[in-house]
Every structure is written in structure tokens, then in C-alpha cells.
Amino acid sequence: MLGLGFGGGQGPGTKRLAAMTAYLDEMDAVETPNPLPKTPMRRIMAAYGPKMLELARERTAGAQTYHVNVAHTAQAREILGPDAFLGVEHAVLFESDPDKARAVAREHLNIYLNSPYNIAKFRRLGYSEEEIAGGSDRIVDDLVFWGDLDTIVEKPPCPCRGRSRSCRGAGDRDRAGGVRDAVLAHARRGTPAPGRQHLIRGSCGSGDSCGGSCPMRTWRRRR
């Protein structure tokens, strides 16, 4: 799988959507004497805004997001449609004391709360200038899930909260068990140490849209 996206170092006047469209055009136009791979290369895009998500839907196999809230995941799934891949990375912190947890989370988020393109993203997500500038409890709690293992397991970024068809019954075991496995894998065996941060990735693979109501049916380990 090939991941594509913009960082923060593009030149002045660069239009991200136009530049990414042109880049995809160039990729598609490349001719090579080498044989094509037996399995076609899937490409996904780092996409946040509606227009970039639409481009990901039209030109790639899906999108990956990072530091977004539950509402954004629902919006992304709606734009991408039921079959596209949607990978969501989310920070978790093994710390149950609210003051300590939020202090560590703010340190982790500091660079993102002060970079222009992330600030624009957070504005679109509905956070005020004051919340972004000060790292409010609301934005911190939305972007970094903290607590003990059982608390974190109950907070996958899934708007359906287990109410959709695929998150009930056997799906409950897949959802909670997958999150627990991912968290423990990053904790390097045993009980997670307090204050340790990890990133976990949720994905909704093609071919299963959770009845259209759950963007995040299964969780997969990120090694």
C-alpha cells in the first residue's frame, strides 16, 4: 500500500488539492517497461477536508486520518462511501489521573496545536480559537484517549458506539478485543505502564460498511 499526502513544508502559493490531483495524474501517466505487479498497488491519501476526501474517494483506495474527533470519522465515512478504506490513528495514554493525563496529552499535542495546517483542521472540527490556543480539556480529551485499559477500550473513535448491526453480537468481541489487542501490542506485553503513550489505528476495510452507520467496525494491530 502506498500512502500519499502533504506535510507542512509546501512552497508559498501551493494549492494542495490541485497539486495532489496533478501528482496523481503524473503517477497514472507513468509508463514503465517493468512488468506490472501481480497484485495491484493500492494507494491511500492523508485527507481531512471534504474536497481532499472526495479526491481520495475518486482516485485512491481510501484515506487515513490522524488527530481527528469522532464527528470527523463519521463525516469521512459519509464522503468516502461504504467501500473505501478508512484508517484512523488515535493517541492513547495509560494514565487515570485527569490532571496528569491532560498535562502529558497537551505536551504531545503542542506541535499540532501550533501548526497552521493543523489549526485549520481543528477549526473545521468545531473547536474555537481559544480551545486550540489553550489546549482545552475538550480538545485534549477528544484527541487523546486516557485512562486505564478498560476505559480506553470503550473509547474507539466510532460514532455508533456499538449500536450498528456489525458492532453487536460477535461484532462486539471483534471491536473490543481488537482495541485491547492493539493497545497491549504497543504496551510491549503485560500491563501498560502509566503515562505511556501509544498510537492505535482503526480501519474499516472495503466491502463492509457496517450497514452504513459505523465507520470503524474492526481494529487492527499497528506494529
Image (cartoon, rainbow, N blue to C red):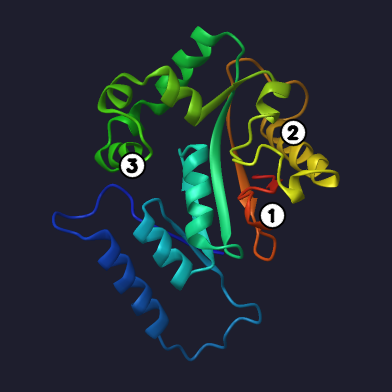
Q: Amino acid at mark 3?
A: Arg
Q: Which mark is residue 210?
A: 1
In the rendered image, residue 64, in percent from the top left (x then y), is placed at 50, 53
Q: Amino acid at mark 1?
A: Cys
The C terminus: image quadrant: top right
Q: Is residue 85 left or right of residue 193?
A: left
Give the residue pinned by disc 3.
124
N-terminal-most mark, 2 or 3: 3
Q: Is residue 64 left or right of residue 16?
A: right
Distance of label 2 from label 3 (alpha carbons): 30 Å
Confirm or deny contact between disc 3 and disc 1 (CB under 8 A).
no
Q: Which element carries disc 2, helix, strand or loop?
A: helix
In the rendered image, residue 153, in percent from the top left (x then y), is placed at 70, 30
Give the residue pinned by disc 2.
180
Q: Is residue 14 left or right of residue 3?
A: left
Q: Amino acid at mark 2?
A: Arg
